Amino acid sequence: MLKVASFFAGICGFDLGLEQIGMKVVFQCEINKFCQEVLKTHWPEVILHSDINQVKSDDIPNDTQVWCGGFPCQDLSLANQGKRKGLEGERSGLFYKYAELIKSHKPRWVIIENVPGLLNSHQGKDFQILLQKLDELGYGVSWRVFDAKYFGTPQRRRRVYVVASLGNLRSAQVLFESHPFEIAHRSGLGKRETIASGNGESYTLDSRGTADAVCKTTNAFRVRKSSRISRTLDGNRYRAIGNAVCVHIVKWIGQRIMQVDED
């Protein structure tokens, strides 16, 4: 059984997806208090650290073979046009700390998720830095942009997934196939008609509140009125969901890693 160390864990998209296909999460790191409570509820026995800047190499179990994490995207996101500091930013720059910990342990597999803006931040120089850093650490690196709507979820969420395999390019076997990619059928999306727009896709809420959405960000789906959820809790919940990793995509990648790792 492959053991997992989860960084920037959020509300456990990586953790849930990887455990559903047979891996075991043994370490988590997440600074947000609301997300920490979610992690403690579902993984009460797992080591949970807060600030990655305070994590030392010895804090992480030596037998973790898969490391995953989507470091903060705020300094990379196209939503912050004109204010994109890239990897020089305080938040997205946490990639360097993540890389430092990777260097100390050299896990067999590393998975990174981020916004498509990672690819063109600073005219592509930030992504070049990421690739060079992982290459220097001895990893073969592959990357691919996936959209959650093709994995059975009624939402368009395009994200970059980077997979790195120690000492070889088996990462390419994980992310790429020699035959056509199977797309989830829309008929299998359950109660799609209750949440979808006219073209069969649900709109995405963004932090600026400027997107064409099915509801106002200040009163999302009338949740507060119907369930008496507080404004603070509702805001934390939607922020956490907005930052979450698509579990369906994680499961697909995790299954591929397990297959390749057994070869």
Image: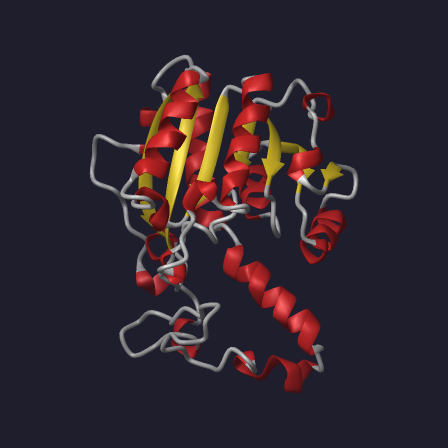
Relative to 60, say whether 236 is above or below: below
Residue 97 pos. (x, y %) = 57, 32
| Of residues 221 and 105, the one drawn nearer to the viewer in this rendering | 105
> Split into 4 quadrants, where in the image is the N terminus?
top right
Quarter containing the C terminus? top left
Question: Relative to the observer, which residue lies in front, 95 or 123?
Answer: 123
Residue 36, percent across and down?
A: 71, 50
Q: Viewed as shown, does residue 137 lie left or right of 98? A: left
**Residue at left offset 31%, top offset 26%:** 172
Residue 152, quarter of the rendered image: bottom left
Judge whether 213 appears above or below 256 on screen: below
Residue found farthest to the top: 167
Say which residue appears at 38% left-offset and 72% top-offset. Answer: 203
> Who is closer to the viewer here, 40 or 178?
40
Q: For the image shown, how many numbered marks are present on the structure?
A: 0
Residue at screen point 40% across, 53% down: 84
Q: Picture quarter containing residue 58? A: top right
Residue 214 picture location, percent across and down: 42, 80
Using residue 75 as the reference point, say whether residue 230 is left or right of it: right
From this viewpoint, which residue is outermost toward the right?
45
